[in-house]
Image (cartoon, helix red, strand yellow):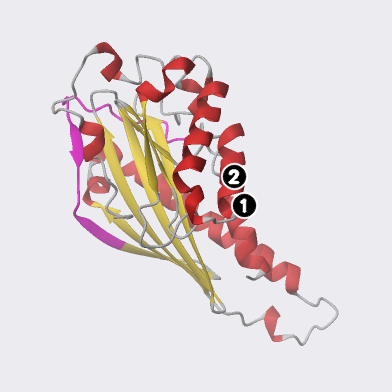
Amino acid sequence: MSLFVKSLLLTLLLTSSAFANTLPAKMDKPESKDIIFDTSTYDEVVEMTYTQSTFHLPALCKNEAYSRTCGFFKNFYVSKFEHDYIGYITDNLNFEDENSDLFIQRDIAYQDVSFDFRVIKELGFMCAVVLVKQEFLDQKATLTDVFNFNLETKKFVHFEDLFEDPTLAAMTCSNLVYNKFKEYGYKNLYVIKAQIEVDPRNYVLLPDGIEFIFTKGTVAPNDVNSRLFISVDDLIAAKPKKEWFPSMKGEILGRKHVSHGIKSKLLN
């Protein structure tokens, strides 16, 4: 795996929280008490100097209430990819050779980004599942990012916001993820387990629990569903906050057990 791909894997892993409080300044909170499932999509291509990004966006992004958020995500992935690629070019230039073709001619790097949004209006937040495929010089990388953010506060929802004892909740999730996938013997699982212990990410927030989503092939074979739903009942010792888990209050969001119906079309 090239330095470029390794850098992308590491930086996307470590910097996804860097823009945690920088959502667009204005977004209207929907009124209906239901969950929006929008499966129709449209494509957009953004060309920069050294990169080309193809986006597959849900029709929801054309809605005025969500268009600025979609634009925020799109701009983030475009600028991040261009920035990482420029860093790669700079690291590999021979500045003593002014005749080097790399000063004037470079291969374009490509990325394909698919967005899958889930809007839970009752709780006033959205979940974004983002599948990123990147390619440069026959090197390929596939990444999965998951973000939950509050429509009212315009901020991302962090794991520590969900529990009175987030450390215990993180340890519980880490152990459950490890027990679920350990039979496959993937070395990445040990790194993921350690990361969940200190900073859980890539989970979908649901009314009756959370669901971790992993890139296919990282914790199990490609034909295995790399997801794990963890019920709020399994996290009760960590004191989940009722404002995020309405099932604790005996409430139902328009349909029974709605969380089990939220399945990303990107990963199924």
Residue closer to the observer: 125 or 68: 125
Q: Are marks 1 and 2 in contact (CB under 8 Å)?
A: yes
Q: Is residue 181 visible?
A: yes
Residue closer to the observer: 202 or 99: 202
Which residue lies at the image location 40% right of the left edge and 35% below the top edge?
148
Is 202 placed left or right of 243 in the picture? right
Where residue 105 sits in the image (x, y, percent)? 62, 82
Numbered range of the magenta stretch: 23-43
Is 265 placed left or right of 154 in the picture? left
Q: Is residue 41 magenta?
A: yes
Is 46 placed left or right of 186 in the picture? left
Instruction: State whether residue 223 is above or below residue 120.
Output: below
Q: Secondary structure at mark 1?
A: helix
Instruction: State whether residue 169 is above or below residue 50.
Output: above
Which residue lies at the image location 48% right of the left edge and 51% below the top edge?
183
Instruction: State whether residue 5 is above or below residue 24.
Output: below
| Residue lying furthest left | 255
Where residue 218 sits in the image (x, y, percent)? 50, 56
